[in-house]
C-alpha cells in the first residue's frame, strides 16, 4: 500500500460528514493524518469547512485542490454503500483518482468499476481485504522483542482507536520507538499498513493478530495494538478475544465512555458491568503464558462538561485503583506513565 504521507485525500463523506458514528473514518483520518486531506465531499455541507479542510459538493469541485486518492470516509450499517454512491465512485475513477474503501462490500467485486479503473490506470484498494496467506497463530507472538499494549473496551465505538493513537503520539513525542498497530480500516488508512481483523476467517483471527505484532516488533519496541469490539458485546465479542490471544499483550488499556450503561447496537440492551469487574475479566482472559494486567483506564468524557469529566476520572480511579484519564481532553501523558511504570 502506498505511503499515506504522500497521498492527497479527497474524503467521501456524502450524508455523513457531521455524524460522529457513521463518519468515524473521516474523523479519524482528519485527526491523525490531517496533512494528507485536501478536501471533503458532502453536498449537504458544501461551502463549509472541517478543521480548515474545504467541503465540496462534487468530485469536480475537489479537483482544484489536487487530490490523488478518494477515500471512503463513512462506516455504514451492514458495511454497504448507500444506494446513490455508485455514481460518486465512478466519478472518482473517471477523474483519475485512486479509490480506497474500508466497507465490507469490496470495490473489486464491481466488475464495471474494475474495468473502468483498468482503463483509467488507477488503483482500487479495499482496506478490509485480508492477506491471502493467513493461518493460525504459531506462538511467534510470545517471541516479539517489544512491549505489547492492547486497548480493550466496555463497548464498541467508544474511542479505542483514538486512545491507541493518542498514546502512540505521546510516546513518539518523548522519543520512544513507538508503533501504532492498526487492526481496522480507519487505522490502516491512517498508518498505511495493518490488517482489518473483522474481515478475517475466525480460525485465522489470532494468526492475523500475531502477524501484526511480529511486524510491529520489526518497526519498534512499544506496540499499541488497536482494539476492536468488546468482550461482553453479544455480537462483536469474537474479534476481541481473537485479538487478546493473537496479540499476546503484556498490558491492557481499558477504554470506557463515561455514563454509558448499556451495550449499543444490541437489541437485548445488555448492561455494562462496573470497571473493576471488566479489569478482572480481561486479566483472566489473557494467555496463561502471557498473563496481562490492565495498566490504566482511558475514559471518553466527550458527553460531559469539564467538571463532570474530572469527577468521572476520579470515580474510575477510586473504583479500579488504577490511573485514569481522558487522553483527548487532558492528554495521554498520565496514561502513558502508567504503562511505562509497568514496563519497567
Image (cartoon, rainbow, N blue to C red):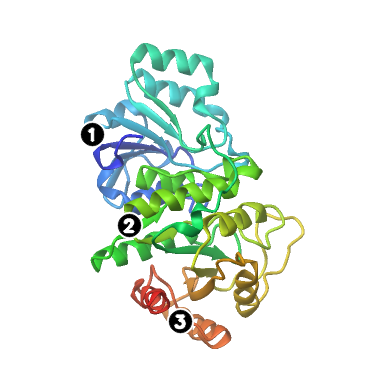
User: Residue at point 53% right, 20% down?
Assistant: 110
Badge 3, how many Cα within 10 Å: few under 14, some, many 20+? Answer: many
Badge 2, how many Cα within 10 Å: few under 14, some, many 20+? Answer: some
Which one is closest to the eye, mark 2 or mark 1? 2
- Residue 210 coordinates in the image, percent (x, y): 51, 51
Q: Is residue 224 above or below residue 210?
A: below
Per the model, the C-alpha gap separating discs 2 and 1 is: 35 Å
| In contact (CB < 8 Å): disc 2 and disc 3 | no
- Where the C terminus falls, by quadrant? bottom left
Q: In this view, does 101 lie above or below 28?
A: above
User: Which disc is residue 323 wearing?
Assistant: 3
Q: Is mark 2 on a helix, strand or loop?
A: loop
Disc with the residue nearer the chain's start (1 vs 3): 1
- Residue 15 coordinates in the image, percent (x, y): 48, 40
Per the model, the C-alpha gap separating discs 2 and 3 is: 25 Å
User: Which disc is residue 65 wearing?
Assistant: 1
Which one is closest to the eye, mark 2 or mark 3? 2
Q: Which of 140 and 184 is in front in this view?
A: 140
**Image quarter of residue 204:** top right
Which one is closest to the eye, mark 1 or mark 3? 3
Q: Which of 32 and 253 is in front in this view?
A: 253
Per the model, the C-alpha gap separating discs 1 and 3 is: 44 Å
- Residue 49 coordinates in the image, percent (x, y): 31, 47
| In contact (CB < 8 Å): disc 2 and disc 1 | no
Q: In this view, does 103 lie to the left or right of 119?
A: right
According to the picture, the residue beneath numbered tag 2 turns out to be 220
Amino acid at each position: 500500500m502506498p505511503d499515506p504521507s504522500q497521498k492527497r485525500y479527497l474524503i467521501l463523506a456524502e450524508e455523513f460528514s457531521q455524524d460522529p458514528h457513521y463518519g468515524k473514518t473521516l474523523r479519524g483520518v482528519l485527526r491523525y493524518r490531517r496533512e494528507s486531506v485536501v478536501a471533503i465531499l458532502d453536498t449537504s455541507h458544501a461551502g463549509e469547512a472541517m478543521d480548515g479542510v474545504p467541503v465540496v459538493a462534487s468530485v469536480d469541485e475537489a479537483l482544484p485542490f489536487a487530490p490523488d486518492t478518494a477515500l471512503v470516509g463513512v462506516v455504514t450499517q451492514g458495511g454497504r454503500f448507500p444506494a446513490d454512491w455508485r455514481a460518486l465512485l465512478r466519478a472518482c475513477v473517471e477523474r483519475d483518482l485512486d479509490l480506497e474503501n474500508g466497507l465490507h462490500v469490496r470495490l473489486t467485486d464491481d466488475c464495471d468499476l474494475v474495468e473502468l479503473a483498468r482503463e483509467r490506470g488507477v488503483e482500487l484498494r479495499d482496506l478490509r481485504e485480508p492477506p491471502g496467506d493467513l493461518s493460525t497463530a504459531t506462538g511467534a507472538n510470545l517471541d516479539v522483542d517489544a512491549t505489547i499494549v492492547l486497548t480493550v473496551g466496555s463497548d464498541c465505538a467508544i474511542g479505542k482507536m483514538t486512545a491507541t493513537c493518542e498514546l502512540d503520539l505521546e510516546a513518539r513525542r518523548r522519543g520512544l520507538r513507538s508503533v501504532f498497530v492498526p487492526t481496522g480500516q480507519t487505522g490502516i488508512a491512517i498508518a498505511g499498513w495493518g490488517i482489518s481483523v473483522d474481515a478475517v476467517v475466525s480460525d485465522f483471527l489470532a494468526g492475523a493478530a500475531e502477524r501484526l505484532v511480529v511486524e510491529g516488533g520489526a518497526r519498534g519496541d512499544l506496540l499499541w495494538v488497536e482494539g476492536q469490539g468488546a468482550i461482553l458485546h453479544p455480537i462483536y465479542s469474537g474479534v476481541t478475544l481473537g485479538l487478546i490471544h493473537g496479540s499476546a499483550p503484556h498490558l491492557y488499556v481499558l477504554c470506557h465512555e463515561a455514563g454509558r450503561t448499556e451495550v449499543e447496537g444490541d437489541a437485548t440492551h445488555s448492561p455494562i458491568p462496573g470497571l473493576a469487574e471488566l479489569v478482572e475479566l480481561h486479566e483472566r482472559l489473557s494467555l496463561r503464558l502471557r498473563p496481562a494486567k490492565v495498566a490504566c483506564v482511558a475514559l471518553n468524557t466527550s458527553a460531559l462538561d469539564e467538571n463532570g469529566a474530572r469527577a468521572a476520572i476520579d470515580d474510575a480511579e477510586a473504583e479500579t485503583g488504577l490511573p485514569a484519564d481522558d487522553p483527548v481532553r487532558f492528554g495521554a501523558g498520565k496514561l502513558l506513565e502508567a504503562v511505562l511504570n509497568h514496563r519497567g
